[in-house]
């Protein structure tokens, strides 16, 4: 992780948050990790990603170097806090959002709420709203028992974003329409064992991934064939190539 930029901490309405900002120029690439993922989890994209513009990453409340959440982490709360943090860090729009896994929900909502400030979105093995409301029906009895065991072993903070995921889905449903900005969806091509992800779940996941690409008339979907859920770790060059193309598309749209 030697290429990671130095991180800083600041207070946003009483919430201590850790962040990093590096690179320079436009667009400002905003990295949104999956649930529980610290900003360090993007380390394989550095330093190459810094050649594409300003790069911003942060730890959401309760993750890494950020303090525990002071209030329920609804989507509206998360994106409003993120925007304040971007302003405090003097990271300026246009923003190109990169949302991995659960961070895809926040990228989805941020793009809707602050459409005038967003020039593109990269959904990286991202969670779609339907994944939250539908995919659980495909869990096996063993999976449900394992999740329940982990929850009893290490109960989540009631303010945690996963505890409040249905509110986040509701926030997205009630938000303005998704903007007509360039979108790239990267899906991992490696399949989990059938006992973890049966055929019906694979088909549903395919549908929701294509649905993310269809949010914008400028959407596309590509598959990282050698990756599972973390293409930024297993195929960082693939992610960087897709991001480079997306940045070029976003710049062309802004100029046009």
Image (cartoon, rainbow, N blue to C red):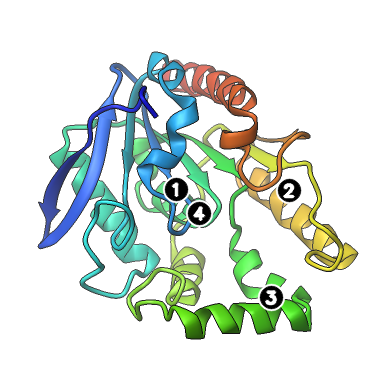
Q: Nearer the viewer, residue 39 or 162?
A: 39
Q: Which residue is mark 2?
A: 210
Mark sitting earlier along the chain (3/4) = 3
Mark sitting earlier along the chain (2/4) = 4
Mark sitting earlier along the chain (1/3) = 1
Q: Which residue is mark 3?
A: 136
Percent across and percent down for residue 244 are 54, 19
Kindly report the distance in space between the C-alpha atoms of the residues bearing marks 1 and 4: 23 Å
Q: Secondary structure at mark 1?
A: loop
- Look at the image and tell me in which quarter the N terminus lies: top left
The relative height of residue 116 versus residue 149 in the rendered view (above or below) is above
Kindly report the distance in space between the C-alpha atoms of the residues bearing marks 2 and 3: 19 Å
Residue lying at 17% horizontally and 36% vertically, measured from the top left? 89
Mark sitting earlier along the chain (2/3) = 3
Labelled pair 2, 3 in contact (Cβ < 8 Å): no
Mark sitting earlier along the chain (2/1) = 1
Q: Which residue is mark 4?
A: 177
Kindly report the distance in space between the C-alpha atoms of the residues bearing marks 2 and 1: 21 Å
């Amino acid at each position: 992780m030697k290429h990671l930029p130095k991180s800083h901490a600041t207070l946003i309405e009483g919430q201590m948050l850790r962040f990093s900002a590096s690179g320079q120029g436009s667009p400002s690439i905003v990295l949104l990790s999956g649930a529980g993922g610290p900003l360090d989890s993007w380390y394989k994209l550095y330093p190459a990603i810094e050649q594409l513009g300003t790069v911003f990453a942060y730890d959401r409340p309760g993750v890494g170097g950020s303090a525990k959440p002071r209030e329920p982490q609804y989507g509206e709360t998360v994106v409003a806090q993120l925007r304040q943090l971007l302003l405090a860090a003097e990271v300026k729009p246009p923003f190109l959002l990169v949302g991995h896994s659960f961070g895809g929900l926040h990228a989805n909502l941020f793009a809707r709420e602050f459409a005038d400030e967003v020039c593109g979105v990269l959904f990286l093995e991202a969670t779609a709203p339907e994944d939250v409301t539908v995919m659980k029906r495909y869990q096996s009895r063993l999976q449900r028992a394992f999740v329940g065991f982990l929850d009893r072993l290490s109960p989540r903070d009631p303010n945690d974003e996963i505890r409040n995921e249905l509110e986040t889905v509701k926030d997205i449903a009630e938000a303005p329409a998704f903007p007509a900005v360039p979108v790239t969806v990267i899906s991992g091509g490696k399949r989990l064992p059938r006992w973890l992800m049966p055929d019906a779940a694979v088909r549903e996941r395919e549908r929701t991934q294509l649905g993310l690409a269809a949010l914008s008339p400028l959407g596309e979907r590509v598959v990282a064939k050698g990756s599972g859920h973390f293409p930024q770790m297993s195929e960082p060059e693939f992610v960087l190539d897709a991001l480079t193309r997306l940045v070029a598309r976003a710049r062309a749209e802004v100029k046009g």
